[in-house]
Image: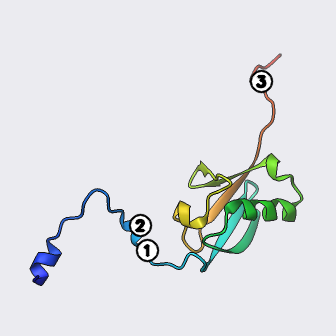
Amino acid sequence: MSDQELNNTPLTGTQDPSLVKTEDPSAPINIKVVSSTGDEVYFKIKRSTKLSKLQGAYANKVGKDVSSIRFLYDGERIQDDETPTTLGMEDGDTIDVMVEQVGGCGTRHY
């Protein structure tokens, strides 16, 4: 097959270029966790580590109950079984932390 034929091979709709990465799933990744007040905590974890482990470590470090805070990546809430690999995270990416709001009815009494 000539180079010209190789270069003109069409990609099918089922191929996802982001899945072609050859990164080792056990390779470490550096992740920055940023609170709504701007406090930053850095973690180095394996790409295959469930992010629930990072969430627990963060909650322990800041002295909060893990159920009282929410972790977001690219504006989406992180699920307990997700990993940096499943989210397509890259080294140096940021996870945002929000304190879960409880209550609030939205009605004001004057």
Contact, mark 1 vs mark 2 (Cβ under 8 Å):
yes
Would you identify the image quadrant in which residue 64 lies?
bottom right
Query: Which secondary structure, mark 3?
Result: loop
Query: Which secondary structure, mark 2?
Result: helix
First in sequence: mark 3 or mark 1? Answer: 1
Q: Which residue occupies the extreme bottom position in the image?
A: 2
Coloration mode? rainbow
Q: Amino acid at mark 3?
A: Cys
Would you identify the image quadrant in which residue 81 lies?
bottom right
Total labels: the figure holds: 3
Q: Which residue occupies the extreme top position in the image?
A: 110
Q: Position of residue 38 (x, y in %)?
A: 73, 60
Q: Position of residue 104 (x, y in %)?
A: 79, 28
Q: Mark 2 highlights which residue?
A: 18
Q: Amino acid at mark 2?
A: Ser
Q: Mark 1 highlights which residue?
A: 21
- The residue lying at 78 percent from left, 20 percent from top is 108
Which numbered marker is on residue 105? Answer: 3
Q: Is residue 38 left or right of residue 22?
A: right
- The residue lying at 54 percent from left, 71 percent from top is 90
Identify which residue, 4 or 74, lies in the foreground: 4
Q: Position of residue 56 (x, y in %)?
A: 79, 60
Mark 2 surroundings: few (<14), some (14-19) or many (≥20) residues within 10 A: few
Q: CA distance from mark 3 to mark 1?
A: 47 Å
Placement of the C terminus among the 4 image quadrants: top right
From this view, report whether residue 7 is shown above or below residue 34.
below
Q: Is residue 65 left or right of residue 93?
A: right
Identify which residue, 94 or 83, lies in the foreground: 83
Q: Position of residue 19 (x, y in %)?
A: 42, 67
